[in-house]
Image (cartoon, grey):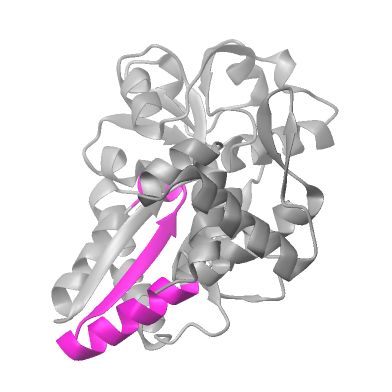
């Protein structure tokens, strides 16, 4: 089992309280305090301090938590790998962004799982930054993310090249055009992803390169969920800037219209990323192959 001192540390960190941690671990509060004291003695640091009555990590404690999470994840992966070997089963945890969640990624992973006996896939949706944290802590096996990779510990394979489009209701007059301009977009009510989303950041960086700002546009609503944004667009409540890959299903069914923006080429790569010691790299090529055929079929059906 995982070292009880590390288990105690992670539980105290999660519960932010020694007493609640003791209840979670079925220990006494003095026993929890003793485990933390022993760990501090082993490491030669102070892990927690109290600030205004709250339990806070010290700078050294932040480092301890980071590695404790990684140790726990690796221990659990070892247990899982042994169990998988005994059952002839392989479990893969895949992290995807909210944009990927709205694309064909889930369908692709389901197709891969259905085509391969003994494969079980878990999909976790989160922000890019959180996915990278989970990947580095071995809480994920793979992640499908957009943009550039700057971590030398992480390997990547290109999955697709995506681009950003203006998405409007079929009833919006803009839907009759082949392209839209930024001037056209300024006249519309906009529904955007939350600040710091990858899609919004890409749009904003291109605006800045043209000496413009998001404040120049009529943003009436900010929403974290892409499915909600597309539903509001379909009801003609506004327009948005979204990744083309996130709209394939709606485009195939003719529910919305996607238009390129004149003089604004917003292209980014979508990649499968994984730790260099990932043991099942053979699955990557097959996932990429299934993705290619699925996207091609969706694009053909939507006339894109």
Q: Please name the residue shown 54% across and 85% down the image.
A: 277
Q: Main secondary structure of the magenta part?
A: helix
| Snapshot quadrant of residue 164 | top right
**Taking 272 as reference, is 172 left or right?**
left
| The one of 131 and 107 positioned closer to us in this rendering | 131
| The one of 275 and 42 positioned closer to us in this rendering | 42
Q: In the image, is residue 46 above or below residue 209? A: below
Q: Please name the residue shown 27% across and 44% down the image.
A: 249
| The one of 39 and 273 positioned closer to us in this rendering | 39
| Snapshot quadrant of residue 275 | bottom right
Q: Which region of the structure is painted magenta?
A: 74-103
Q: Please name the residue shown 58% across and 49% down the image.
A: 33
State the image coordinates of residue 197 (x, y, percent, origin top left): 59, 37
State the image coordinates of residue 150 (x, y, percent, origin top left): 73, 65
**Taking 33 as reference, is 289 left or right?**
left
The answer to if 233 sits in the magenta stretch is: no
Q: In the image, is residue 126 above or below residue 39? A: above
State the image coordinates of residue 61 (x, y, percent, origin top left): 72, 53
């Amino acid at each position: 089992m995982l070292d009880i001192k590390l288990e105690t540390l992670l539980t105290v960190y999660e519960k932010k309280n020694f007493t609640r941690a003791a209840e979670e671990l079925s220990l006494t509060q003095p026993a929890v305090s003793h485990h933390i004291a022993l760990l501090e003695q082993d490491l030669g640091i102070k892990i927690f301090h109290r600030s205004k009555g709250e339990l806070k990590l010290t700078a050294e404690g932040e480092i301890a938590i980071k590695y404790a999470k990684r140790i726990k994840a690796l221990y659990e992966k070892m247990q899982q790998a042994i169990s998988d070997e005994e059952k002839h089963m392989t479990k893969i945890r895949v992290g995807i962004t909210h944009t990927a969640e709205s694309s064909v990624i889930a369908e692709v992973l389901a197709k891969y799982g259905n085509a391969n006996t003994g494969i079980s896939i878990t999909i976790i949706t989160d922000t890019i930054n959180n996915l990278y944290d989970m990947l580095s802590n071995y809480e994920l096996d793979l992640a499908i993310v957009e943009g550039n990779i700057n971590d030398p510990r992480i390997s990547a394979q290109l999955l697709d090249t995506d681009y950003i489009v203006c998405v409007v209701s079929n009833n919006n007059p803009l839907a009759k055009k082949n392209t839209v301009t930024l001037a056209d977009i300024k006249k519309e009510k906009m529904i955007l992803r939350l600040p710091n989303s990858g899609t919004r950041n890409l749009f904003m960086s291109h605006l800045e390169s043209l000496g413009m700002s998001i404040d120049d546009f009529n943003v009436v609503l900010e929403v974290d969920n892409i499915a909600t944004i597309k539903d509001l667009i379909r009801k003609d409540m506004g327009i948005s800037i979204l990744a083309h890959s996130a709209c394939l299903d709606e485009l195939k069914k003719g529910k919305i219209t996607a238009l390129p923006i004149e003089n604004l080429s917003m292209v980014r790569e979508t990649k499968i990323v994984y730790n260099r010691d990932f043991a099942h790299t053979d699955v990557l090529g097959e996932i990429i192959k299934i993705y290619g055929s699925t996207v091609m079929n969706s694009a053909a059906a939507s006339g894109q």
